[in-house]
Image (cartoon, grey):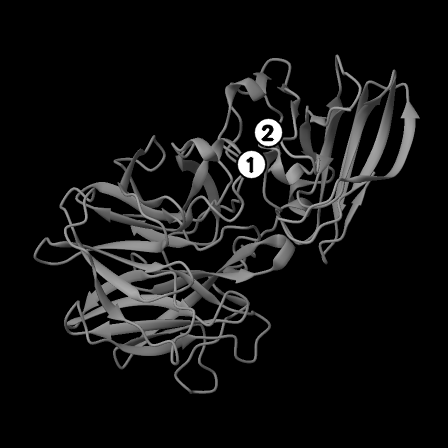
């Protein structure tokens, strides 16, 4: 029996939008964390004029590296992706744990730059004059084992690139050509001290301030780590280090890896992620100040010089008040292109889908799952979007046409169970499948948990996600 999957779906919120989408802006001049209750892993942020831009990792999902825009650091929408597809053949199939890691975004000479690494393919740079318009992607260096790059342009015009190595290794600095497309040397190790700063990664140049060069890097691991900052009088070191943010007495585990940004009014703010398992790495916004030549992020209530995350705070002073906004979720498929909330599990293929904006429909073509496990984890033609809130409901209207035995069309929480309309022999069934697993590399064939025959060719399917990430299908 063929294992084929087609999703023909209309996604709508079952209740009012405000009940389904996380709202950090409290409407009274304050906000609550996280400001993005979705998996925007390894965020970096910049300000250009009155506009803020954020980028994040995409891993195997494509189009890759979402570009989000905000006017106030609290209310964000998706405006673009850095690339439509990675230009490497293997990304035509899902590559879990691969793809784009920890991008950095910078603005220099009227040009926006994003640098990122893939662990197996090397260093990439993308550039554009307008972050909402197409980016030009360049593979700067083909090499295995690099991660988390960030560029810096010094006062004399010399460009540099800082990066680490997979496995959370040392900080390595290169000179960079003026166009950002060529490394000019083999790199110099500028910091390594595993006893003080273990699992060092996520490098971000911050600033040159009062004669010091500063870069930031998290340490201690994703789930329980901390944020450190490093400074030196010479860009090559020697560097001092200081922990500037940790969990402390709060419930925000591992508050680290992100970007420091200054508002138009002179305030400093830091955006970082928190590991939330099923929800991914959600994004928090912390106030920051400078004290004795070091940033203090969050609130230092106990006076130890290390900040702790805040859950609520006054919004950043950006000189104006802006309307609430949130990343896109619902889609009525009424336009000529997919909404920016959607990604595929591999490089997009135009043969996978067709949109009919006048009818408000999206047709996805069934394709075989490329492994014997039958797991959706290996299906490139999954149309995906991130969890949008701690608790929400997604509803889909779905039809299965011209189906052969074994064809399925459904609604899934990836790496979990799913509900589908499927063809069994000459009859349609509504079925729920369970996926037993032990990580991505040990997935067993899905088994039927429940199945009922139906004469319907069109059905409404729903998944309700509770605050503990428990999912209920109906």
Residue 190 versus residue 412: which sits nearer the camera? 190
Say whether residue 422 is left or right of residue 128: right
Residue occupying image coordinates x 52% and y 56%: 35
Residue 456 versus residue 336: which sits nearer the camera? 456
Q: Is residue 152 above or below residue 394?
A: below
Residue 52 visible in the picture: no
Q: Are marks 2 and 1 in contact (CB under 8 Å)?
A: yes
Counting from the top left corner in percent of width and height, residue 263 is at 32, 58
Label 1 sits on residue = 345
Residue 453 versus residue 444: which sits nearer the camera? 444
Label 2 sits on residue = 381
Counting from the top left corner in percent of width and height, residue 209 is at 19, 69
| Mark 1, other Cα within 10 Å: few <14 / some 14–19 / many ≥20 | many
Counting from the top left corner in percent of width and height, residue 16 is at 69, 40
Q: Is residue 109 above or below residue 46?
A: above
> Which residue in the rendered view is the most extreme toward the front?
372
What separation in Å lies between label 2 and label 1 (alpha carbons)? 6 Å
Residue occupying image coordinates x 41% and y 67%: 218
Say whether residue 70 is left or right of residue 30: left
Q: Is residue 107 above or below residue 228?
A: above
Q: Is residue 423 above or below residue 164?
A: above
Which mark sits nearer the N-terminus, 2 or 1? 1
Q: Quadrant of residue 212?
A: bottom left
């Amino acid at each position: 029996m063929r294992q084929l999957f087609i999703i023909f779906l209309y996604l709508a919120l079952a209740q009012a939008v405000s009940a389904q989408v996380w709202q950090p802006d409290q409407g009274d001049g304050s906000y609550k964390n996280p400001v993005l209750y979705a998996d925007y892993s390894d965020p970096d942020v910049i300000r250009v004029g009155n506009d803020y831009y954020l980028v994040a990792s995409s891993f195997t999902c494509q189009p890759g590296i979402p570009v989000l825009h905000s006017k106030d650091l609290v209310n964000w929408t998706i405006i673009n992706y850095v690339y439509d597809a990675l230009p490497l053949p293997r990304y035509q199939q899902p590559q879990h744990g691969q793809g784009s890691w920890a991008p950095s975004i910078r603005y220099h000479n009227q040009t926006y730059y994003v640098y990122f690494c893939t662990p197996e393919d090397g260093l990439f740079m993308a550039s554009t004059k307008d972050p909402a318009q197409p980016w030009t992607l360049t593979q700067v260096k083909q090499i295995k084992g690099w991660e988390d790059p960030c560029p810096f342009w010094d006062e004399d015009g010399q460009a540099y690139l800082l990066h680490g190595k997979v496995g959370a290794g040392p900080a390595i600095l290169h000179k960079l050509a003026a166009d950002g497309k060529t490394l000019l040397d083999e790199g110099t190790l500028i910091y390594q001290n595993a006893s003080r700063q273990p699992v060092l990664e996520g490098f971000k140049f911050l600033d040159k301030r009062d004669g010091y060069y500063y870069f930031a890097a998290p340490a201690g691991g994703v789930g329980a780590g901390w944020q450190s900052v490093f400074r030196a009088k010479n860009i090559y070191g020697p560097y001092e280090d200081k922990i500037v943010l940790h969990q402390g007495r709060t419930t925000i585990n591992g508050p680290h890896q992100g970007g420091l940004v200054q508002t138009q009014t002179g305030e400093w703010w830091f955006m970082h992620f928190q590991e939330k398992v099923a929800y991914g790495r959600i994004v928090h916004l912390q106030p920051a100040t400078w004290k004795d030549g070091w940033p203090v992020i969050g609130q230092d209530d106990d006076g130890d010089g290390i900040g702790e995350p805040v859950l609520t705070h006054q919004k950043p002073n950006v000189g104006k008040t802006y309307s609430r906004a949130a990343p896109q979720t619902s889609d009525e498929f009424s336009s000529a292109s997919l909404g920016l909330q959607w990604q595929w599990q591999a490089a997009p293929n135009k043969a996978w889908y067709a949109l009919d904006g006048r009818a408000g429909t999206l047709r996805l073509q069934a394709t075989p799952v490329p492994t014997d496990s039958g797991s959706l984890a290996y299906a490139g033609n999954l149309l995906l979007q991130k969890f949008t809130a701690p608790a929400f409901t997604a509803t889909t209207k779905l039809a299965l046409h011209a189906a052969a035995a074994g064809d399925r069309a459904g609604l899934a929480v990836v790496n979990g169970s799913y509900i589908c309309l499927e063809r069994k022999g000459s009859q349609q069934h509504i079925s729920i499948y369970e996926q037993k697993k032990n990580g991505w590399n040990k997935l067993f064939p899905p088994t039927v948990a429940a199945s009922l025959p139906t004469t319907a060719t069109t059905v409404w399917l729903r998944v309700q996600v509770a605050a503990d990430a428990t999912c209920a299908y109906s």
